[in-house]
Image (cartoon, helix red, strand yellow):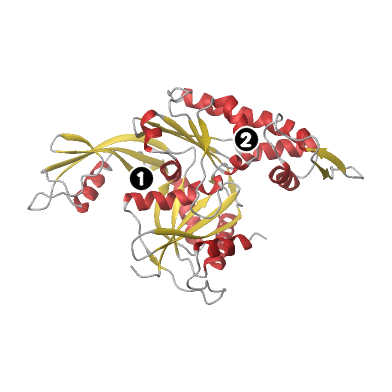
């Protein structure tokens, strides 16, 4: 492989748009080399409500990423999520095509295509096919049949479908941002594959991704994807509570939450104070972190309660043996793990990618897509060219220097 092979993922959330760029070295290792972010506009509850604004947000994130890595991004993998997603099981079967009966990638692709032949309403479209197990001549519970000998290859799969209009609007926005679409990925599944261990999935676990406007739930049982759901709650609810409680603008409430917020009143400080310019007030007031946490904690506790309730409504135990694994931007809130343990029990943790230089739960989706595609062997590489209109990335930068260059974009 040449040094010019790159892949990029796009995570279009309610509050943030994130572009993750990775480089593939000659040995096939994928290394994250940069991130581009922008404020998400034209989005509500994970759905596009204004294509032109969404296009502008995508372009801003792409330009940010291009400045960091010094290449022009022309193609992305797109993460898809939302409350329009549904799962259904399917079965596919094919005859092994080679004369020597050795199963190859071509046969695996064929059987996965056969599993997609299902009756679908005209308003729905297939997003992804997730194999649960392969069966070779009656031998089941095979994870990867590549290289095995056999005559008949079967697959039991989960078909991820979505509303065609929602998916089309997302893809149209990406196209209007002058980007080619390398493929689409079910975002909660990618986040789960990055964040969950095999032991957790075998025991039974709930992956929770809390974003700005929605919360995605992915349930695993016996090692397989068993259910998914989206709750229309997210970090913007906390921000709105702060805006109302402190009588400040929404933008200021968001800044206060990120800088001073603590989700636990038991761990917040009454000595740490900050100035607040309340709407209609002539002078600034001093507010303590403890007072702020009295606004944040009830909303966070309510969100966690709704998550447990949703898991029960899906037909799964709200105290799974593998517990809860939490990701998303809201999980960066200080002391939030203490509230999580009060609601979910001790078997709960926060997941964050650690291969981009910083541990940030909000990047689990975008990094997860690249990890997931690499694991499934589904990466399609893009020959991105050096940018002539923006500063070029210097050759030979170490991972530390690359992360440092990326972080400087935020200073």
The percent coordinates of residue 316 (x first, y second) are 43, 24
Provide the secondary structure element on which disc 1 rests. Answer: strand
Residue most extreme to the bottom: 388
Task: Determine whether 357 is above or below 383 in the image.
Answer: above
- Is 105 situated left or right of 62 in this image? left
In percent of the image, x 49 and y 41: which residue is there?
A: 82
Of 116 and 107, the residue lying toward us: 107
Q: Do the residues labelled 2 and 1 touch (CB within 8 Å)?
A: no
Crowdedness near tag 2: few (<14), some (14–19) or many (≥20) residues, C-alpha within 10 Å: many
Residue beneath label 2, please?
336
Residue most extreme to the right: 282
Residue beneath label 1, please?
128
The percent coordinates of residue 146 (x first, y second) are 20, 48
Task: Determine whether 325 is above or below 375 in the image.
Answer: above
Crowdedness near tag 1: few (<14), some (14–19) or many (≥20) residues, C-alpha within 10 Å: some
In percent of the image, x 87 and y 41: which residue is there?
A: 285
In percent of the image, x 37 and y 37: which residue is there?
A: 198
Provide the secondary structure element on which disc 2 rests. Answer: helix
Task: Determine whether 109 is above or below 271 in the image.
Answer: below
Indicate the quadrant where residue 157 lies: top left
Q: Nearer the viewer, mark 2 or mark 1?
A: 2
């Amino acid at each position: 492989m040449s040094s010019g092979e790159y892949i990029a993922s796009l995570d279009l959330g309610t509050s943030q748009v994130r572009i993750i760029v990775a480089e593939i070295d000659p040995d096939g290792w994928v290394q994250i080399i940069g991130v581009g972010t922008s404020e998400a506009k034209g989005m509500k509850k994970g759905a596009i409500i204004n294509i032109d604004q969404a296009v502008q947000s995508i372009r801003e994130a792409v330009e940010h990423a291009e400045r960091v890595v010094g290449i022009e991004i022309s193609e992305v993998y797109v993460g898809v999520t939302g409350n329009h997603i549904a799962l259904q099981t399917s079965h596919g079967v094919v005859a092994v095509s080679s004369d020597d009966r050795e199963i190859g990638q071509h046969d695996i692709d064929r059987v996965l295509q056969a599993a997609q032949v299902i009756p679908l309403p005209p308003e729905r479209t297939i997003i992804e096919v997730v194999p649960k197990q392969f069966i070779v001549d009656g031998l089941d519970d095979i994870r990867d049949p590549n290289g095995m000998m056999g005559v008949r290859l079967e697959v039991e799969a989960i078909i991820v479908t979505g509303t065609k209009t929602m998916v089309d609007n997302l893809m149209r926005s990406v196209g209007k941002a002058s980007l080619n679409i390398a493929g689409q990925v079910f975002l909660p599944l990618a986040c789960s594959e990055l964040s969950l261990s095999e032991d957790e999935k075998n025991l039974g676990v709930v992956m929770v991704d809390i974003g700005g406007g929605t919360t995605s739930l992915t349930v695993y049982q016996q090692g397989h994807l068993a259910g998914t759901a989206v709750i229309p709650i997210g970090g913007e609810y906390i921000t709105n509570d702060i805006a109302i409680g402190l009588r400040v603008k929404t933008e200021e409430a968001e800044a206060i939450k990120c800088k001073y917020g603590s989700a636990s009143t038991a761990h917040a400080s009454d000595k740490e104070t900050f100035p607040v310019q309340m709407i209609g007030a002539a002078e600034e007031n001093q507010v303590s972190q403890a007072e702020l946490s009295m606004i944040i904690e009830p909303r966070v506790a309510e969100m966690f309660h709704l998550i447990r309730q949703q898991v029960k409504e899906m037909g799964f135990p709200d105290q799974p043996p593998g517990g809860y694994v939490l990701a998303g931007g809201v999980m960066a809130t200080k002391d939030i793990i203490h509230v999580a343990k009060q609601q979910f029990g001790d078997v709960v943790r926060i997941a964050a990618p650690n291969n981009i230089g910083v541990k940030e739960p909000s990047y689990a989706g975008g990094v997860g897509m690249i990890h997931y595609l690499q694991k499934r062997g589904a990466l399609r590489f893009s020959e991105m060219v050096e940018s002539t209109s923006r500063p070029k990335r210097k050759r030979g930068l170490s991972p530390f220097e690359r992360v440092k260059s990326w972080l400087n974009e935020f200073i």
